[in-house]
Image (cartoon, helix red, strand yellow):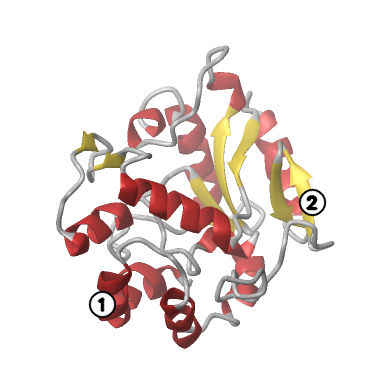
Amino acid sequence: MTDNAMMDCFGFRSVESSDFVNVDGCFVDKEVLPFYNKLKERLAEDGFALRLESGYRPFERQLSIWNRKASGELKLLDANGVPMERPADEEKLMYVILTWSALPGASRHHLGSDLDVVDGNACPEGYEVQLTPAECNGMFAPFHQKLTQLMDSGDAFGFSRVFVPGRGKIQPEQWHIAHLPTSRKRLENFSLTELRRIYERTDIACKSALLDNLDRLAEDYIYPYFI
């Protein structure tokens, strides 16, 4: 495939684009940066150190995550975040991956407005963050409680959680926050038709299952999160 073909369905942007800035080693849409800094300052008032674990991901990065999970190179987790065996059936494997990973080309991380965050002050020295429910309910619980408070009171500078209980079939992710005023502009470019075309010409694991079920997948794993 050519570089131009390796694009997401929100419109191609590379990390070299002037649209992005580097924060904590991750790339973020430059429109989001002022609001991220304000949120960081607000959380610091209560002793939290907002730290970015993941930001913008191009199509190639999300595809790599998907394919490595399908091959067994990356571990698969069940709905409780517990490692599980790799299903032999392609369709079952597809749904297991979707429990915690977005469809390549339709991930909100392609927007540049969505961030995976933790409290740097709560991380023991040398600790490798996993982004799991156990962390959110353990070492990062006070941090997420404060985030919830700020979001509920409208004091989170436009940030909100997208992957929440009762919305679609992706498991809740407290660590994933989105700057909605920015992401809504990016979502306007999405095309399910283009996503199908991309899959048809891409070496993606579970391709047959994805193409056969794409319309239903969109209703359960894509559109519910376009808020």
- The vertical placement of 121 against 115, above or below, is above
Q: Nearer the viewer, residue 188 or 60?
A: 60
Q: Which residue is mark 1?
A: 213
The residue furthest top is: 125
The residue furthest front is: 1
Place of residue 116 in the rendered image (x, y in percent of width and height, measured from the top left): 54, 44
Left or right: 91 with respect to 31? left
Q: Earlier in the sequence, mark 1 or mark 2?
A: 2
- The vertical placement of 125 against 137, above or below, is above
**Which quadrant of the figure contains the N terminus?**
bottom right
**Callout 1 secondary element:** helix
Residue drawn 46% across the image and 64% down it: 104
CA gap between label 1 and label 2 equals: 36 Å
**Callout 2 secondary element:** strand
Packing grade of label 2 (10 A; few <14, some 14-19, many >=20) is many
Residue drawn 48% across the image and 52% down it: 64
Packing grade of label 1 (10 A; few <14, some 14-19, many >=20) is few
Q: Nearer the viewer, residue 147 or 79?
A: 79
Q: Nearer the viewer, residue 32 or 199?
A: 199
Place of residue 212 in the rendered image (x, y in percent of width and height, measured from the top left): 25, 79
- Residue 161 visible? The answer is no
Place of residue 9 in the rendered image (x, y in percent of width and height, measured from the top left): 55, 76
- The vertical placement of 95 against 124, above or below, is below
Q: Amino acid at mark 1?
A: Asn
Residue drawn 80% across the image and 62% down it: 17
Quarter location, residue 39: top right
Q: Amino acid at mark 2?
A: Val
- The vertical placement of 225 against 36, above or below, is below
Place of residue 136 in the rendered image (x, y in percent of width and height, measured from the top left): 40, 33
Q: Which mark is residue 21?
A: 2
Left or right: 19 with respect to 77? right
